[in-house]
Image (cartoon, rainbow, N blue to C red):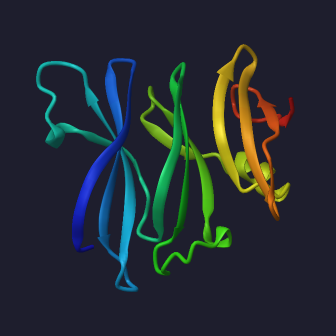
Amino acid sequence: FDDVGAFQDKWFIHRGYIYYHEIEYFTAEYGGVSARSLIKRLRLGSNMKADKAQIVYQTDESVSVSMIIGFIPYKNYIYFTYVGTDASKKYDGSRDMLRTKAFRYDVSEEKCTELVGFMDTFLDAGYEFIEEIVPYSKGFLIKASLIKGNEQEFPIYAADENMENIHIF
């Protein structure tokens, strides 16, 4: 990558660490600017320098991330979703080019897992985005987004603590 620049846009504190989302901009294969997404963490304390940050997750070179939809710290996990495009192609504004992926980071094991089945449930039903995920007493509430012509729908779904057993709320 030819680095163009970087900035941090979202952050939160969870279990003794500050977590933050960093976007690195670079020159893409097609000649335009693309972006790589990194989620980093720093232990809270007096020696908090950016060069000591641990990378929790980063997108690979094939994805240009346009936004992290949100972080949900919950018990020993951090859930997050992102929307991105194919980094090798110039984004033309078409919703067909967008991809949404969901992940769970295990704070104890320091392991990030893609929640493939979770996103497939929504994509198979025709939903394009996960707008919001909120913890509640039995797991999570998920607000999805579906656009049909000039109309938008935002149904609410429920899922258990493992982001499984998804059903309309």
Left or right of residue 123: residue 80: left
Image spot of residue 82 (x, y percent)? 54, 51
Task: Work out whether 68 lies above or below 72.
Answer: below
- Quadrant of the image occupied by residue 51: top left
Task: Work out whether 26 lies above or below 136.
Answer: below
Q: Which residue lies furthest to the bottom in this view?
A: 30
Left or right of residue 54: residue 134: right
Tell which of 50 and 128 is nearer to you: 128
**Which residue does the image show at 72% across and 13% down from the upper left?**
137
Figure quadrant of the N terminus: bottom left
**Which residue does the image show at 38% across and 64% down from the upper left?**
35
Left or right of residue 16: residue 110: right
**Which residue does the image show at 53% across and 62% down from the upper left?**
84
**Which residue does the image show at 12% across and 19% down from the upper left?**
46
Image spot of residue 102 (x, y percent)? 60, 47
Image spot of residue 95 (x, y percent)? 66, 67
Q: Residue furthest front?
A: 150
Tell which of 98 and 50 is nearer to you: 98
Left or right of residue 42: residue 47: left
Figure quadrant of the C terminus: top right
Tell which of 93 and 156 is nearer to you: 93
- Quadrant of the image occupied by residue 48: top left
- Quadrant of the image occupied by residue 16: top left
Image spot of residue 128 (x, y percent)? 72, 56
Task: Work out whether 61 lies above or below 37.
Answer: below
